[in-house]
Amino acid sequence: MKMSGGVEWAVHCCVVLSEAEGPVPAQRLAEFHGISRTYLAKHLQALSRAGIVSSTEGRVGGYVLTRPADQVSVLDIVLAVDGREQAFRCTEIRQNGPLPASQEVCRQPCGVARVMYAAEQAWRSSLKDVTVADLAASVSVDVGAGTFPALRGWLAGEG
Amino acid sequence: MKMSGGVEWAVHCCVVLSEAEGPVPAQRLAEFHGISRTYLAKHLQALSRAGIVSSTEGRVGGYVLTRPADQVSVLDIVLAVDGREQAFRCTEIRQNGPLPASQEVCRQPCGVARVMYAAEQAWRSSLKDVTVADLAASVSVDVGAGTFPALRGWLAGEG
DNA sequence: GTTAACGCGGATAGGTGATATCCGTGATTC
DNA sequence: GAATCACGGATATCACCTATCCGCGTTAAC
Ligand code: SF4
Ligand code: SF4
């Protein structure tokens, strides 16, 4: 079990965007986090396709959160970047072998699959309860209230 | 996010073992599920290392559940086969860039990481609540009570 | 109009881990 | 001693993640 590393980047970027005042170019987001610009762009495109961020093309373009930060859950970001597929994939091995399950039984997932799906649902539900706004608030508590003003200053300057 | 396909095999094998009367060779387990014998052996070895099943070598050897079926959770199997590592891995990008977080702040995981770990905990907790015995019972309900006697018959015969 | 900055999409390597197979060794039973 | 079986390592294959690059269209500033 492994989640795409891009999820971490995407979440961080969304938190930054929630505190920014205008569009932020991918270049700037990458610099701020000390990560690859070109690869981050890929993940931002995924966020864009999912409707989480909007992009402004052209000279002073960049990315902006489409919805307010308290309406973007962490689950939204994870699904956009890491894909919507379930971690557990049933290959229907119950239909193999000398004692295969009948067609009618296989209409619905068996107990094994149901347990896996339920666990995954619990996972998703947990991620759905936290929004980007919540994360921004927890960052303020963890690293201090002065962080975001400093961030805004850096985003505005150096250009 | 993707779970190893071997998990499905391993869970099915544990259910079968819980209903078997004696040691079952990997050969027989693979035949019954219509899957690769050699590759299944790998996963069974993982279960063996985790102490979930025990192997008997020699002429009439095979695999047996080490503990009673109601003391083996699905989580045990998943962790044994798929690994114990968390799906989310923090790369501490908060320490990069022009506004790095201080050393003391980074002693503990930030809000992002905490959310991810909590979700994973919910997932594991959900899997921990279901045992192999529960699964066996649900199979009986789904495909009929005559399944396991037929299974035992097949395991005993054809050899 | 020209230029520069920016997002988008595809093409393309490279690397890592999952998948799958094989063989030699040792243990057990007959 | 022969047959059966689990075990571990070595190996090959393959899919996907990671990462980079380039050309294109768009937009604002000059
Ligand atoms: S997990 Fe359930 S649905 Fe999937 S192959 Fe096994 S029996 Fe079938
Ligand atoms: S997720 Fe949290 S702990 Fe991990 S790099 Fe980001 S800020 Fe640091």
Image (spheres, coloured by chain):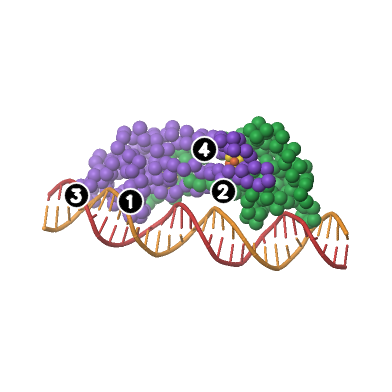
Chain colours: A green, B purple, C red, D orange
* Residue labelled with disc 2: A5
Chain of the residue on which disc 2 is drawn:
A
- Residue B68: image x %, image y %? 31, 33
Chain of the residue on which disc 3 is drawn:
B
Dot 4, how many residues are within 10 Å of its Cα: few (below 14), some (14-19), or many (20+)?
A: many
Q: Quadrant of residue A71?
A: top right
Check contact, mark 2 vs mark 1: CB within 8 A.
no
User: Mark 3 vs mark 4: which is more N-terminal?
Assistant: 3
Q: Residue at x 36, y 46 (%)?
A: B46
Query: What numbered label is drawn on residue B41?
Result: 1
The secondary structure type at the circle numbered 2 is loop
Dot 2, how many residues are within 10 Å of its Cα: few (below 14), some (14-19), or many (20+)?
A: some
Query: What numbered label is drawn on residue A31?
Result: none
Dot 1, how many residues are within 10 Å of its Cα: few (below 14), some (14-19), or many (20+)?
A: some
* Residue labelled with disc 3: B59
Q: Residue at x 33, y 47 (%)?
A: B45
* Residue labelled with disc 4: B120
Is residue B137 visible to the viewer in this orientation of the structure?
A: no
Most extreme residue toward the front is: B103
The secondary structure type at the circle numbered 1 is helix
**Amino acid type shown at disc 4:** Glu
Dots 2 and 3 on the same chain: no
Q: Residue at x 50, y 35 (%)?
A: B121
Q: Quadrant of residue A21?
A: top right
From the image, state whether disc 4 or disc 1 is nearer to you.
Answer: 4
Q: Nearer the viewer, residue C21 or A154?
A: A154
- Residue B148: image x %, image y %? 31, 40
Measure the alpha-carbon separation of dots 2 and 4. 16 Å
Q: Nearer the viewer, residue B140 or A146?
A: A146
- Residue A12: image x %, image y %? 64, 43
Dot 3, how many residues are within 10 Å of its Cα: few (below 14), some (14-19), or many (20+)?
A: few
Is residue B23 visible to the viewer in this orientation of the structure?
A: yes
